């Protein structure tokens, strides 16, 4: 385990808290050039795009659930999931595995946490400070390091999650965690009746999930205001039931050059190498251009 004393939060010098529309805060990552959450509402996003999208209100009726939070970050997705589960079934026992690159992020997040319940707050604090928590209701562990490596340990252990939260930075900024090879390992950690949810609707990511053998569903936007707002994420399962099918437009998107996935054969290439490899494959492809697809569907 990393020494938490040597990774003490340097909140002001590394991440400035960014207010979001629902009153909760997120961080901006200088390394990736993006915020950790949607500025439309960090807390709301955790509930809608992850906890609710993975059907946790219904799943909570089980006696035990397992969660896998990839790119744990500030811990919001885990927190929202626990709140939903215990709201619907206070006796449900939950196992949580979080994968995070930088321990300083969850540690710094303790200073800007939204008002979670006391039991959930205690779990977030325990994960940030000791990287593990053990209570009668929750067994949780946070693995620090490159998720491409830590996911392999979970596969070897046969870990199976009822819900997987896939929440890296965008594919353009962090292609390492959106490749066919990485998502194939993630899929191996999904239980037969489980749900995987991500905010990402990119055709390259959806194609990689399909290559892993998963069925795809869309996460629709309640009231889209513009033509380019056709979905707010993706849900994937081993079975096609319980999913909102992709629209014809989304299905055709997968067949364009945008649907050529990222690849990382040995799970150790740099972001630049992964991007360049995909770009070369796109340039050599005879698929329809994404711009032509956008024009055909009136997407501006």
Image (cartoon, rainbow, N blue to C red):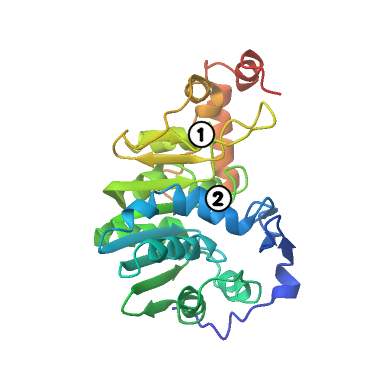
* Foreground of the two, 109 or 287: 109
Q: At x 38% / y 61%, what residue is drawn?
A: 88
* Residue 102 percent location from the top left of the image: 56, 68
Q: At x 35% / y 69%, what residue is drawn?
A: 90
The local secondary structure at tag 1 comes to helix
Mark 2 and mark 1 residues within 8 Å of each other at the beta carbon: no
Can see residue 36? no
* Foreground of the two, 139 or 1: 139
Mark 1: give few (<14), some (14-19) or many (20+) Cα within 10 Å: many
Tally of numbered tags: 2
Relative to 211, does residue 43 appear above or below in the rendering?
A: below
Quarter of the image with the N terminus is bottom left
Q: Compare marks 2 and 1 and give the one earlier in the sequence.
A: 1
Quarter of the image with the C terminus is top right
* Foreground of the two, 6 or 20: 20
Q: At x 40% / y 77%, what residue is drawn?
A: 132
Relative to 1, does residue 31 appear above or below in the rendering?
A: above
Mark 2: give few (<14), some (14-19) or many (20+) Cα within 10 Å: few
Left or right, 230 with respect to 97, comes to right
* Residue 218 percent location from the top left of the image: 47, 34
The local secondary structure at tag 2 comes to loop
Residue under numbered circle 2: 270
* Residue 84 percent location from the top left of the image: 44, 60
Left or right, 185 with respect to 117, comes to left
Q: At x 34% / y 80%, what residue is drawn?
A: 135
Residue under numbered circle 1: 204
In space, the residues marked 2 and 1 are separated at their CA atoms by 18 Å
Residue farthest to the top, as pictured: 296
């Amino acid at each position: 385990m990393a020494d938490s004393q040597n990774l003490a939060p340097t909140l002001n010098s590394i991440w400035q808290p960014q207010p979001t529309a629902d009153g909760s805060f997120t961080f901006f990552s200088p390394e990736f050039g993006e915020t950790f959450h949607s500025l439309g509402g960090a807390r709301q996003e955790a509930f809608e795009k992850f906890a609710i999208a993975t059907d946790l209100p219904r799943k909570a009726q089980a006696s035990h659930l397992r969660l896998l939070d990839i790119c744990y970050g500030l811990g919001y997705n885990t927190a929202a999931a626990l709140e939903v589960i215990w709201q619907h079934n206070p006796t449900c026992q939950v196992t949580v595995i979080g994968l995070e690159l930088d321990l300083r992020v969850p540690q710094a997040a303790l200073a800007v946490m939204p008002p979670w319940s006391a039991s959930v707050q205690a779990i977030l604090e325990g994960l940030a400070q000791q990287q593990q928590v053990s209570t009668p209701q929750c067994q949780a562990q946070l693995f620090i390091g490159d998720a491409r490596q830590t996911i392999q340990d979970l596969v070897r252990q046969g870990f199976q999650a009822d819900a997987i939260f896939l929440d890296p930075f965008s594919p353009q900024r962090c292609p390492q965690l959106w490749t066919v090879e990485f998502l194939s390992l993630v899929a191996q950690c999904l239980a037969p009746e489980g749900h995987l949810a991500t905010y990402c609707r990119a055709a390259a990511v959806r194609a990689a999930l399909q290559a892993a053998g998963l069925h795809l569903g869309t996460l629709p936007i309640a009231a889209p205001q513009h033509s380019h707002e056709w979905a707010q994420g993706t849900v994937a399962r081993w079975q096609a039931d319980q999913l909102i099918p992709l629209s014809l437009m989304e299905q055709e998107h997968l067949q364009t050059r945008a649907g050529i996935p990222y690849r990382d054969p040995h799970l150790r290439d740099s972001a630049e190498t992964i991007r360049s490899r995909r770009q070369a494959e796109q340039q050599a492809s005879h698929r329809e251009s994404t711009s032509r697809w956008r024009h055909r569907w009136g997407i501006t």
